[in-house]
Image (tube, helix red, strand yellow):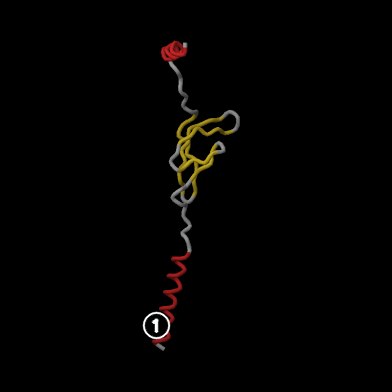
């Protein structure tokens, strides 16, 4: 009787070990990406998301539990502007 219990215990431990090692964990992988504006952005990436025809905001790709999601950082998107002084210098160089 003792031998049968020991054998069943050993088999149970073996089966659970094999199953535990063969089933991949249900976690998001290290190469997570978000999709925004038709492009794939890696986790941690920041882009200007275009929502509809008029709404735009700065967002970062982040992981929430097991999924990737956009986190809104600020309304609107930063734009680069050329100062009048730089514009004049560029015009002179181009001739």
Q: Residue 35, image x and y in percent?
A: 53, 41
Give the residue at mark 1: 6
- Outermost residue on the bottom side: it is 1
Looking at the image, which residue is at 55% across and 32% down?
50
Query: Secondary structure under badge 1?
Result: helix
As displayed, is residue 79 above or below residue 91? below
Looking at the image, which residue is at 48% across and 33% down?
58
Q: Residue 6, image x and y in percent?
A: 39, 82
Pick the front one: 28 or 40: 40
Q: Quadrant of the N terminus?
A: bottom left
- Outermost residue on the right side: it is 53
The image quadrant that residue 11 belongs to is: bottom left
Q: Residue 26, image x and y in percent?
A: 48, 57
As displayed, is residue 49 above or below residue 2? above
- Outermost residue on the front side: it is 95
Looking at the image, which residue is at 46% across and 46% down?
63
The image quadrant that residue 21 belongs to is: bottom left
As displayed, is residue 54 above or below residue 40? above
């Amino acid at each position: 009787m003792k031998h049968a219990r020991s054998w069943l215990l050993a088999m149970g431990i073996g089966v659970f070990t094999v199953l535990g090692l063969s089933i991949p964990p249900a976690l998001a992988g290290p190469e997570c990406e978000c999709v925004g504006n038709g492009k794939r952005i890696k986790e941690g990436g920041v882009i200007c998301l275009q929502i509809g025809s008029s709404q735009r905001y700065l967002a970062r790709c982040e992981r929430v539990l097991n999924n990737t999601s956009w986190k809104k950082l600020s309304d609107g998107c930063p734009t680069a502007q050329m100062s009048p002084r730089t514009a004049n210098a560029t015009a002179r160089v181009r001739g």
